[in-house]
Amino acid sequence: MNEVHIHSCANGDGEANGGGGGTQPMVVREDAMAEPLAKEEPMLEQEPMLGADEEAEEDYRVPVSVEVCLRGSSHVDGAQVAAALARFLEGRTIWYRNGPLDLSECEDPLLLQHVESVAVADTDPHQHRLNSPLLFWQYSPRIFVYQLSDEAPADDDEGEEGVPSYRELLLPAADLAGQWEALQFDSSIQQRLLSYATSALLFADRGVDANLVVVLLYGPPGTGKTSLCKALAHKLSIRLADRYRQGCLVEVNAHSLFSKYFSESGKLVSRLFSKITELVEEPDSLVFVLIDEVESLTSARKAAVSGSEPSDAIRAVNALLTQLDALRRHPNVMVLTTSNITQAIDVAFVDRADIKAGRSSSSGGR
Ligand SMILES: Nc1ncnc2c1ncn2[C@@H]1O[C@H](COP(=O)(O)OP(=O)(O)O)[C@@H](O)[C@H]1O
Ligand SMILES: [Mg+2]
């Protein structure tokens, strides 16, 4: 098991961010999951063979992720836009740093008509060329073309007392734009999550390992867990836009699913999963299921085991776990979960998580 200690450096603008919780040490662990990327592998790409007298530095190009946001009104083939941008970048120097790319010299009518903005994203903080110019032969652009959805989230209104039991949001969503970039952690947790999750989804798509990926983020309130899950879903839907026509985030309200009216819970769980199944059976959709504050679900099961809650609770949680297992055969779904407390997480649930990141449980719970 690999453990990397990191520190969250929340910038304090969050509502639940008081008390310095954001400076607690956190731990990233990758277990249970095949490691798609070698840990020390530099983010470099081999070029075809060059003459022996070429400089060693010329043997590779720095891969640069370039994200192209199309205008809302555009109906254009993303591949054409990517090709046009690649032509525009040919022979150009760019700065290796996150931020907008200057298109003012662009004369390509396709780009002028359809592109809202272009940005360099997710530069590698360990790359020594960070914040330096890259000449055209020193980088290879990886272009991702996407369009934001500004559709409002759709609620399932069958939850207890009008509280929706889940909410569905099309991705990439205008509401989540910039959230990934706004989050700050003083480790490479974002980069690592993104590369593991991207590889896992691509491996699943190619049939290497179709198992559904469960990501579990844990730590004190206000450390950015919920924001990071949503931003990750948004980001992955941009990164995989050429494979999956649309993304969808299903936000499960665990509190309302496992309300005190447990007899309703079983019904809500089956409604939820018939919705999710409907979504994942569309092979062109990438579906993220976010179960926030999963401890409310698992503590329900514990309470049931100890006999203080009706056995409906245990049936409902078991139904949820069984349904999660049943989703496994679909390569186009990823489950994201968060927990504010680490000790209370159901072992049955933790066992299902492939990527776990959060505050070390040895540093104490809430
Ligand atoms: N590491 C961080 N970087 C930037 N903003 C953060 C960070 N952690 C928390 N925040 C901000 O604090 C607020 C609460 O974060 P949230 O994701 O709800 O935390 P959690 O789910 O861990 O309780 C959000 O507005 C978020 O943007
Ligand atoms: Mg949260």
Image (tube, helix red, strand yellow):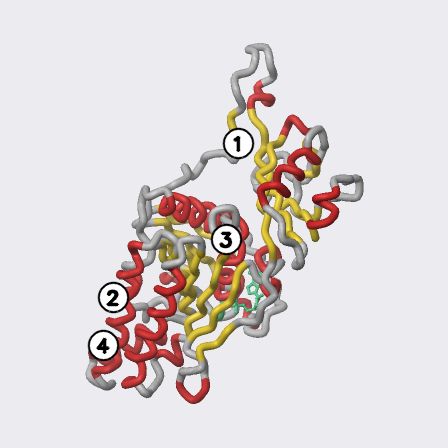
Q: Earlier in the sequence, mark 3 or mark 2?
A: 3
> Marks 1/3: CA distance?
28 Å
- Drawn side of residue 104 relative to residue 231, left or right: right
* Callout 4 crowding tier (Cα within 10 Å): few <14, some 14–19, many ≥20: some
> Marks 4/3: CA distance?
36 Å
Q: Which-is-in-front pick, marks 3 and 2? A: 3
Asked where in the image residue 161 lies, by quadrant, the reply is bottom left
SS state under label 1: loop
Q: Earlier in the sequence, mark 1 or mark 3?
A: 1
Q: Which residue is mark 3?
A: 245
Q: Is residue 363 above or below residue 160?
A: above
Q: Residue at x 27, y 73 (%)?
A: 317
> Marks 3/2: CA distance?
28 Å
- Drawn side of residue 132 relative to residue 267, left or right: right
Q: Earlier in the sequence, mark 1 or mark 2?
A: 1
SS state under label 2: helix
- Disc 2 marks a residue whose amino acid type is Thr
Q: Earlier in the sequence, mark 4 or mark 3?
A: 3
Asked if one can make out residue 192 in the rendered structure from this viewpoint, the answer is yes
Closest to the observer, 233 or 144: 144
- Disc 3 marks a residue whose amino acid type is Arg
Q: Which residue is mark 2?
A: 322
> Marks 1/2: CA distance?
41 Å
Closest to the observer, 15 or 72: 72
Q: Which residue is mark 4?
A: 315
Q: Residue at x 24, y 82 (%)?
A: 312
- Disc 4 marks a residue whose amino acid type is Arg
